[in-house]
Image: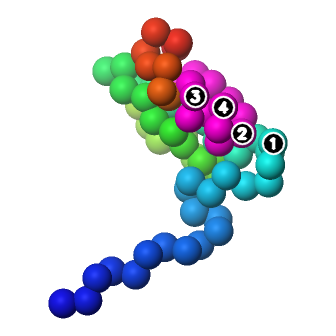
């Protein structure tokens, strides 16, 4: 069995993009779950933006800070 190929697409959802560019959002759903979300994708039903658009690093910091930050 062959291992699946690793995604190397530079436009993947966790690509940081150009340094300092606003590329991501932090979303939260009705249950309080947080999600890191690429700016180029539509926000799914049942989720709302609580942070961003902002650079990937800032969004990661926000997700890591947890629900108290929302």
Q: Which mark is residue 58?
A: 4
Disc 3 is placed on an element classified as helix
Residue 12: x, y in percent? Answer: 57, 63
Residue underneath mark 2: 55
Residue at 43% of width from left, 29% of height from top? 34
Question: Is 58 or 30 nearer to us in this picture?
Answer: 58
- Verify whether residue 61 appears in magenta: yes
In which quarter of the view is residue 28 placed? top left
- Find out whether the residues at labels 4 and 2 contact each other: C-beta distance under 8 Å: yes
Residue underneath mark 1: 20
**Looking at the picture, does residue 55 appear above or below residue 6?**
above
Residue 56 located left or right of residue 20: left
- Find out whether the residues at labels 1 and 2 contact each other: C-beta distance under 8 Å: yes
Farthest residue, direction bottom:
1
Q: CA distance from mark 3 to mark 2?
A: 10 Å
Q: CA distance from mark 1 to mark 4?
A: 9 Å
Residue 44 located left or right of residue 25: left
Judge the density around disc 4: few (<14), some (14-19), many (≥20) Cα neighbours within 10 Å. Answer: some
Residue at 33% of width from left, 80% of height from top? 4
- Sequence-wise first label, 1 or 4: 1
Q: CA distance from mark 1 to mark 2?
A: 6 Å
Disc 4 is placed on an element classified as helix
- Sequence-wise first label, 3 or 1: 1
In which quarter of the view is residue 52 placed? top right
Q: CA distance from mark 4 to mark 2?
A: 5 Å
Disc 1 is placed on an element classified as loop
Residue 46: x, y in percent? Answer: 41, 31
Q: What are the residue bounds of the magenta stretch?
A: 47-62
- Find out whether the residues at labels 3 and 1 contact each other: C-beta distance under 8 Å: no
Residue at 43% of width from left, 15% of height from top? 67
């Amino acid at each position: 069995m062959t291992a699946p190929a690793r995604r190397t697409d530079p436009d993947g959802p966790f690509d940081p993009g150009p340094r300092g560019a606003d590329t991501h959002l932090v979303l939260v759903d009705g249950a309080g779950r947080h999600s890191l979300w690429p700016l180029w994708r539509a926000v799914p039903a049942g989720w709302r933006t609580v942070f961003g658009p902002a650079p990937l690093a800032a969004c990661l910091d926000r997700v890591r800070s947890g629900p108290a930050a929302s």
